Amino acid sequence: MNKGIQKLFSEVPNTYELVNHLLTFGLDIAWRKKTAKIASELGGKRWIDVCCGTGEMVAYLSQLAKDDTQIFAADFSLPMLSKAFLKPEGKHIKFVLSDIKKLPFDDNIFDLITISFATRNINLNRDILIQSFSEFYRILKQGGSFINLETSQPSLSLIRKLFHFYAKLFVKPIGSFVSGSKASYTYLSKTIPKFYFAEELVDIMRIAGFNEIHYQKLFLGISAIHQGFKS
Ligand SMILES: C[S@@+](CC[C@H](N)C(=O)[O-])C[C@H]1O[C@@H](n2cnc3c(N)ncnc32)[C@H](O)[C@@H]1O
C-alpha cells in the first residue's frame, strides 16, 4: 500500500469536491454524470466504483441503478470513504476499505467496474497500473465492462501546453489554499502532465486483458472516458 498517497487523500476530504468543481468550472460534475449514464446503461446486477473517494461517482451510479442492483465502493482512505458513507445515497452502497491492488472479492463477480479521476493516482508506474487494471479484470465477470474517467492529453500540442500551464498555475495554489493541504495539491498538479495519451491508456488496458476498448475525448481531450470489456 502506498502510505504517502493514502495520507495525502486523508488530508482533503472536506474540501475535495469543492476544489474539483472550482478548478474545472463544474465540468467534472458533467463528466462524472455522463460516465455514470454510460455505465448504468450497460446494466448488470453488481457494480463497483473503485477509488471512490468522497463518493460522487458512486452516488450518480446509485441514482441511475435499478432497485435490485448491488453497488459497492472501495477506497483505501477511511476519511474519504467516511464522506462517501454520509451521502444520502450512501445507505444503498456497500463500502469497502481496501487497496485496489488486492481487492477482497472472488474472481468474476462484477458486471461493472468504474473508476474516476483516480487512475493517475494508482499509476505509480506503468507496470503497477497494469497490475491494478489486471486486478479489476480478475473481479469482472465475463461480458462485464470497465469504465475509466480520467484526465488525458489533448492531441493538439498548443491545447496540451495550455492545459499543463493551467494545471501548474492554478491546481497547486487554488487546491492548497482551499484545502489547506499544500502537499496534496503539489502532488496532484504534478500527475496531470505526466499521464498517458488516450491511445497509450488503450494499450495498458489491453495488456491488462480488456478487449473491445474504445474511448471518447471530453473538452478538447483534457479528459477521456475509456471503456473495455472482459470477453
Ligand atoms: C482523486 S481521488 C478520486 C475520487 C473519486 N473517484 C472522484 O471521482 O472524485 C483518488 C482516490 O483514490 C484513492 N486511492 C488512491 N490509490 C488507491 C489505492 N491503491 N487503493 C485504494 N484507493 C486508492 C484515494 O484514497 C482517493 O480517495
Image (spheres, grey):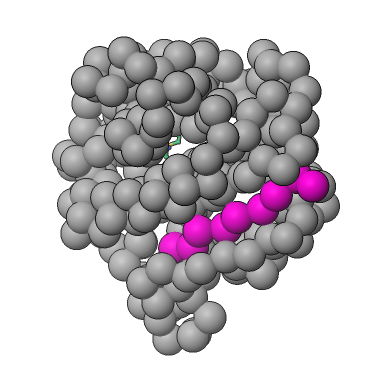
Indicate whether residue 227 is drawn in magenta.
Answer: yes
Is residue 125 among the parts visible in the rendering? Answer: no
Residue 156 locus on image (x, y percent): 49, 85
* Residue at image coords 22%, 20%: 88
For the residue pair 180 and 133, the one nearer the viewer reads as 133
> Which SS type dominates the magenta stretch?
strand
Say whether residue 121 is left or right of residue 208: left
* Residue at image coords 28%, 55%: 30
* Residue at image coords 25%, 15%: 86
**Image: 9 above or below 173:** above
For the residue pair 184 and 225, the one nearer the viewer reads as 225
Say whether residue 64 is left or right of residue 105: left
Is residue 15 among the parts visible in the rendering? Answer: yes
Indicate whether residue 101 is drawn in magenta.
Answer: no
Residue 186 locus on image (x, y percent): 39, 45
Residue 196 locus on image (x, y percent): 61, 62
> Magenta segment, which residues?
223-231
